[in-house]
Amino acid sequence: MSALGGVVRGGLGRRRVQTLVMALTVTMAVTASVLAAGLVVASRAPFAHAFARQNGAHLTVRADGAKATAAQLAATARVPGVTAAAGPDPVVSLRPTVEEGSGRGIPPGERLPPLTVVGRDQAGGGVDRADLTAGAWAAGKGQIVVNADGPPFAIGDRLTFQALPGRPTLTVVGRARSVSRTAGAWVTPAQATALVAPGASRTYQMRYRLRAAGTDAEVARARAAIAAALPPGTLDGAASYLKTKLAAERTSATFVPFVVAFGLLGLAMSVLIIGVVVSGSVGAATRRIGVLKSLGFTPAQVARAYVGQALIPAAAGTGLGVVLANLLSVPVLRQAEDAYGAGSLTIAPWVDAAVAAGALAVVAATALVPALRAGRLRTIDAIAVGRTGRATGRGRGPRRLLGRLPLPRPVSLGLADPFTRPGRSATMIASVVLGTVGVTFCAGLALSLHSVQHGLDHRSPGEVVVRADGPPPGGGPARPPKPADPAAVAAKIAAQPGTRAYFRTGRAQIGVAGRAGAVNAVAYEGDSSWGPYTMISGRWFRSAGEAVVPTGFLRATGTRVGDTVTLTNEGRSAPVRVVGEALDLSDEGMTVLTPAASLAGLRIETEPGSVQFNVDLAPGTGVRAYLASLNGVLGQGGPQAQRNTSEASTTIIAMDTLAGMLTAMLVAVAGLGVLNTVVLDTRERAHDLGVHRALGMTPGQTTAMVLTSVAGIGLVAGAAGVPLGLALHARVLPAMGESAGTGLPAGALDPYGAPLLAALLLGGLAIAAAGALLPATWAARIRTATALRTE
């Protein structure tokens, strides 16, 4: 063992550069593998895991404090079927306004949509624990914790509630996430009580965990039992976790195809790179193995020695890679948390252990095979292979052919070099191909996600929106606002200088013949041709009797674009022809978009608070000045105009960020694979480099020769990797759309333009050149005499 130990130590000391490169490569490969496997595992039922960990609420109710006391509400925790309860906590619904210097991307003074603010003295508890993602929990007056899935508020931002007396201002001290989606923000109970508007009744929130909550019927029975235990009319509303669960599972299902694609790419590349690095390192030591055999070492002892030489740096790299992966998982999994809305995600310990064991097993296997093969060679053959491996005739034909071309000699030598060791060149091509596939897929995914986000923004076009109705200024159901006259609001918008175009929409619940249950109807009044939805197929409606519907509606009703569907309401019916399929993920796609005249025969009433005007401004009109002028005309206490701000999807942002992170990791691993291969190659060719230098090759020409030796590989890898990346994109993106329950517009399915494809084709060349740059620099700096003495 002492002799073998000396061989191992001597080999590691003699090949310090290769040992360092092997350790770094294994580190990056293990890091990529742990992150990839961890993301795939985290994508499995993230809502269910988070719901169990946070003790999520199966049922959340809102109760009128004027009809039931806090004690009566607390007593509902003993209703049969309830296993745990939290509350009663005061709750108010308020419209915040951001102060100057607050709110990333939100203009100061802009009134935001209503925010449900719950008074809770702690984030924990037996039901619906909130996970703090940043900052601290509200501990006193003037502090507020915002939902991490809500508007992009940062810690330190100041929110003012202008509808309340004294215009109270609260400072954001933390961001938290509740898997049950029970609040948009949290304050202390005393602060929540202080935010109730004068004259409004107190409203409370109760959260329950139920013994049976697997179906809507079971949750409804629990709600009925709780309502029966309270004075009549106490419950103002209730929310079941099942709807939140459905939305969360659809989001995570959308995420899974993309994560799995990157995960498999990362795992495949990691196994390939480790195999290339280890087998290349052992294969390069064939002559040394012959020397050891001449000294009396058996093939088994030789194999053990070289497996040990591979495992020592690999073990160090594996340990470092696991640590690095868990550090990098913090920002990576934070993006996944934002996408899933699932609270804190971590790398499972068994993933660390499995990847580490797998990496060391791959290292041992890939080192054992070439070591045994070399160990079984006759001693004289092993020594001869080591000394004359480059003089076997391989590559002479391509070298002669390229030498006849009108190319500089260093370039022709470099281009011919991959043919000398075709096996090593093939593995290098494979690693660069996988890196190019990742870059191509990531670029297409980012463009597709941007196209989808842009398409979703089209659902509410125009720079300004005017909502004709609003919630009470704070607190409970007292003093509901009087609905504004839509015709009067429309007249004021039309008369306002700077208005270029506008239309009005209102929502109502209607039926569809042949289908149980109601769907949403969005009735348009005015010319909406300037602001249609993004179309997947067909066109936007042009007249009464035509309708546009999302993919979800078509699938649920079994209809296609061009079919006629019959809308119903209380015994009345109205046929409409479906002329287009629109991109819309809200309400599971069960929406009908049509002119109001199409629904005239149904005599429907629009839902309170649903009437909205979308306004397009004339060129050169300032939004701020227009808002101030129009709100002055509309008056106080009625409809309010506000800037139309698009809502960026946290899922899309998370996918985009994750794709960039994982692609950078794949490219780094591919580059290290190239680096290791070129290091082995230049070390083996040190004597040849010395001959070239002695014949007058300059350091610049030496660098060019080494870089050119990987240029052809990079171009071939780019030519192979780009089509594979396109194919992966073409397979994964429709699967993501299918998981989200929607088709995708043509711009999202085919985002690649000619300039981008040309750049991507050069991506393999860039990866190969970056990996070869360091050994090329070393080759240029080696002294001629030193190189000529190298065996």
Image (cartoon, rainbow, N blue to C red):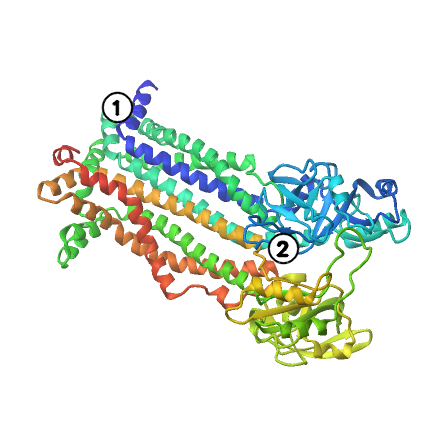
Q: Quadrant of the N terminus?
A: top left
Q: How many marks?
A: 2
Identified by mark 1, the residue type is: Gly
At a point 59% along the width and 62% down the height, the residue shown is 644
Up-down: is 628 above or below 255? Answer: below
User: Which quadrant of the structure image shows residue 32?
Assistant: top left
Q: Position of residue 240 (x, y in %)?
A: 75, 51
Q: Residue at x 54, y 72 (%)?
A: 618
In the picture provided, is 140 more to the left or to the right than 730?
right
Give the alpha-carbon distance from disc 1 to disc 2, as whole Å.
65 Å
Which SS class for mark 1? loop
Mark 2, other Cα within 10 Å: few <14 / some 14–19 / many ≥20: some
Q: Secondary structure at mark 2?
A: helix
Tag 2: amino acid: Arg
Q: Farthest left residue?
A: 695
Q: Position of residue 141 (x, y in %)?
A: 70, 38
Residue 332 is labelled as none
18 sits to left or right of 215: left
Q: Which residue is mark 1?
A: 296
Is residue 685 visible in the rendered image? The answer is: no
Q: Quadrant of the C terminus?
A: top left
| Residue underneath mark 2 | 250
Front-lying residue, 293 or 488: 488
Q: Earlier in the sequence, mark 1 or mark 2?
A: 2
Q: Residue at x 22, y 47 (%)?
A: 420
Mark nearest the camera among 1 and 2 is 2
